[in-house]
């Protein structure tokens, strides 16, 4: 089954790739590797903001991380000239969680992105990963994730 069909089965429509918010590019391609800039948590109602361990629960953080994964795929689709089926695999994610100093469940938050990518892409969605705490993130968002992808 194609990636586009699998996403459709999951009820996911990739949005237009978000434009960069400053002096950087949304992705860089070197050979068959695409490096995607950090994508912030953004849902249908706008930015998903909050601090894990203070005003946001792990489940809400994981849902925010999933939105980052969807934006990452939107950037990969743009890098592939609109053909998401050129994606070969997710190589690595680096997830940043806006969290209090004593919050230690960053991996469970970033699982929202990882679980979605495996659900959407199967084995091609399995990746290496880092999940780290941040004292704050741009615009007060809960999660930001950057990724490395292999394309054909």
Image (cartoon, helix red, strand yellow):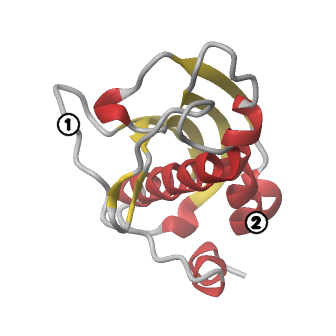
Q: Quadrant of residue 36?
A: top left
Residue 90 spot, x, y in % from top left: 66, 46
- In the picture provided, is 58 more to the left or to the right than 73? right
* Label 1 secondary element: loop
Q: Which residue is mark 1?
A: 21
Q: Quadrant of residue 133?
A: top right
* Label 2 secondary element: helix
Q: Quadrant of the C terminus?
A: bottom right
Residue at x 56%, y 78% (from the top left corner): 4
The total number of labels drawn is 2
Relative to 101, residue 29 above or below: below
From this viewpoint, which residue is outermost toward the right?
123
Labels 2 and 1 touching (C-beta < 8 A): no
Front residue (pair 100, 149): 100
Within 10 angstroms of label 2, few (less than 14), some, or many (20 or more) residues?
some
Q: Which residue is mark 2?
A: 119
Residue at x 58%, y 20% (from the top left corner): 100
Residue at x 33%, y 65% (from the top left corner): 45
Residue at x 16%, y 25% (from the top left corner): 23
Q: Quadrant of the N terminus?
A: bottom right
Residue 47 spot, x, y in % from top left: 34, 51
Front residue (pair 90, 29): 90
Within 10 angstroms of label 1, few (less than 14), some, or many (20 or more) residues?
few
Residue 89 spot, x, y in % from top left: 68, 50
Residue 117 spot, x, y in % from top left: 68, 57
Front residue (pair 138, 90): 138
Alpha carbon separation for disc pair 2 and 1: 29 Å
From this viewpoint, which residue is outermost toward the left?
23
- In the picture provided, is 122 more to the left or to the right than 27? right
Residue 139 circle label = none
């Amino acid at each position: 089954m194609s990636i586009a069909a699998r996403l459709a089965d999951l009820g996911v429509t990739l949005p237009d790739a978000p434009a960069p918010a400053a002096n950087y590019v949304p992705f860089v391609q070197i050979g068959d590797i695409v490096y995607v800039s950090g994508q912030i948590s953004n849902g249908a109602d706008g930015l998903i903001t909050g601090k894990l361990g203070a005003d946001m629960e792990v489940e809400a953080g994981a849902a925010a991380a999933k939105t980052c994964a969807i934006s990452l795929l939107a950037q990969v689709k743009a890098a592939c000239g609109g053909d998401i089926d050129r994606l070969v695999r997710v190589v690595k994610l680096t997830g940043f969680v806006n969290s209090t100093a004593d919050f230690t469940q960053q991996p469970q938050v970033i699982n929202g992105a990882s679980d979605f990518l495996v659900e959407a892409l199967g084995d091609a969605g399995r990746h290496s990963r880092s999940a780290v705490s941040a004292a704050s993130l741009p615009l007060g968002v809960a999660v930001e994730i950057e990724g490395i992808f292999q394309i054909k």
